[in-house]
Image (tube, grey):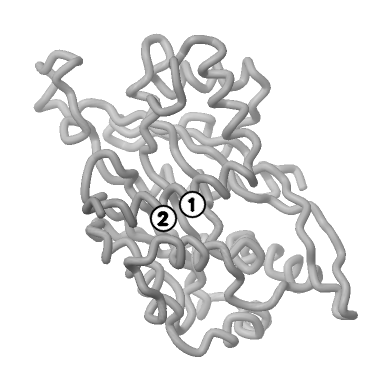
């Protein structure tokens, strides 16, 4: 078995299910091929993937990160999002062919007593860290874990109550560990599509709705990290109606992000064919990420 075979199995499983839930992914990639931007989908670099978690006992960042730390990822910068009551870390991959990972968690103790009660009525079913029970070298088992419910199906009133206070909380209570987004590295595309601004224009020309929170282009203070994202696609979600049956309501699912990492000033002299990942702006920017989170919010989806 190759060094990274298990990690590849885990990431492939995540992407396979993500693509099933987010039709825009296939639509964008097919259009890129059809219009000659790329010859094959395999040419696209996945800049990063992201997960959302609940900051409660046995779960949250400290649990989920174990999967990726085990496979060679390294924890990097810490971020806080005060208004949204979130913490986050990003993780660098063990090899450049793998995406960075961004894991956030909701600071549940900072919510209202009612919201905390609702969340714990579900998450208290988890009485030990579920990752500790996994064979992390079994890619199929990890893949299954990342797509299975950790608590019972929420009710529609509970979902709505959480969404009124924290749309992040509502997203996680239903979607759990489903992949929140993957990210196309725009800077690796051929001109003129290799900037977020130009790629955004192309996306809109094929009918893709973009997140407008903070502007369609989210730019870091140093000007070296530019990001944008689609508006989350609505999915038909089945909720527990409290009477042994289900009721279906459309809710925000996942979305697609786009990132342009510009060359660091100290490497500006390098010819384009000599530029690698290590020569570009790395990491993330809290101001950008804060607005990207809103891709699943009602202000963007109109739900």
Per the model, the C-alpha gap separating discs 1 and 2 is 5 Å
Residue 254, above or below 44: below
Q: Which residue shows up at 22% across the image and 53% down it?
A: 3
Judged from the image, the secondary structure of the residue bearing numbered disc 2 is helix
Left or right of 18, for residue 218 = left
Task: Please state the horizontal and vertical placement of residue 252, each as a whole percent of the image.
Answer: 68, 50
Determine crowd level at label 2: few under 14, some 14-19, many 20+ residues with C-alpha closer than 10 A: many
Which is nearer the eye, 55 or 111?
Answer: 55
Which is nearer the eye, 131 or 52?
Answer: 131
Task: Please state the horizontal and vertical placement of residue 277, each as a whole percent of the image.
Answer: 22, 33
Left or right of 263, for residue 176 = right
Left or right of 115, for residue 37 = left
Circle 1 residue: 13
Q: Which residue shows up at 68% across the image and 42% down it?
A: 233
Judged from the image, the secondary structure of the residue bearing numbered disc 1 is helix
Which is nearer the eye, 86 or 146?
Answer: 146
Residue 156, above or below 51: below
Residue 173, above or below 273: below
Task: Please state the horizontal and vertical placement of residue 43, each as a whole percent of the image.
Answer: 38, 25
Quadrant where the N terminus is found in the figure:
bottom left
Task: Please state the horizontal and vertical placement of residue 175, each as a whole percent of the image.
Answer: 62, 61
Q: Which residue shows up at 19% across the image and 28% down it?
A: 276
Residue 34, above or below 154: above
Left or right of 152, for residue 190 = left
Circle 2 residue: 10
Q: Are marks 1 and 2 in contact (CB under 8 Å)?
A: yes
For the image, the number of numbered tags is: 2
The answer to which image quadrant residue 95 occupies is top left
């Amino acid at each position: 078995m190759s060094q990274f075979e298990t990690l590849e199995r885990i990431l492939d499983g995540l992407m396979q299910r993500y693509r099933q839930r987010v039709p825009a992914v296939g639509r964008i990639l097919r259009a890129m091929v059809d219009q000659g931007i790329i010859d094959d989908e395999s040419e696209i670099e996945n800049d990063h993937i992201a997960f959302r978690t609940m900051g409660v006992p046995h779960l949250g960042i400290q649990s989920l990160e174990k999967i990726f730390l085990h496979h060679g990822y390294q924890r990097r910068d810490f971020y806080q999002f005060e208004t949204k009551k979130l913490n986050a870390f990003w993780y660098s991959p063990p090899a450049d062919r793998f995406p960075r990972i961004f894991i956030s968690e909701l600071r549940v103790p900072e919510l209202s007593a009612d919201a905390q009660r609702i969340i714990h009525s579900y998450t208290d079913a988890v009485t030990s860290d579920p990752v500790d029970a996994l064979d992390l070298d079994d890619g199929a088992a990890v893949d299954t874990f990342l797509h299975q419910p950790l608590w019972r199906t929420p009710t529609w009133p509970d979902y709505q109550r959480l969404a009124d206070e924290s749309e992040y909380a509502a997203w996680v209570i239903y979607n759990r560990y489903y992949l929140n987004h993957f990210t196309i590295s725009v800077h690796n595309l051929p001109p003129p599509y290799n900037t977020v601004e130009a790629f955004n224009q192309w996306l809109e020309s094929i009918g893709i709705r973009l997140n407008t929170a903070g502007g369609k282009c989210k730019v870091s203070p140093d000007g070296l990290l530019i990001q944008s994202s689609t508006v989350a696609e609505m999915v038909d979600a089945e909720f527990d109606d409290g009477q042994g049956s289900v009721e279906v309501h459309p809710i925000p699912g996942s979305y697609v992000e786009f990132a342009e990492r510009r060359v660091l000033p100290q490497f500006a002299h390098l010819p384009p064919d000599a530029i690698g990942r290590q020569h570009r702006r790395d990491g993330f920017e809290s101001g950008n990420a804060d607005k990207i989170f809103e891709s699943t919010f009602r202000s963007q989806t109109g739900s």
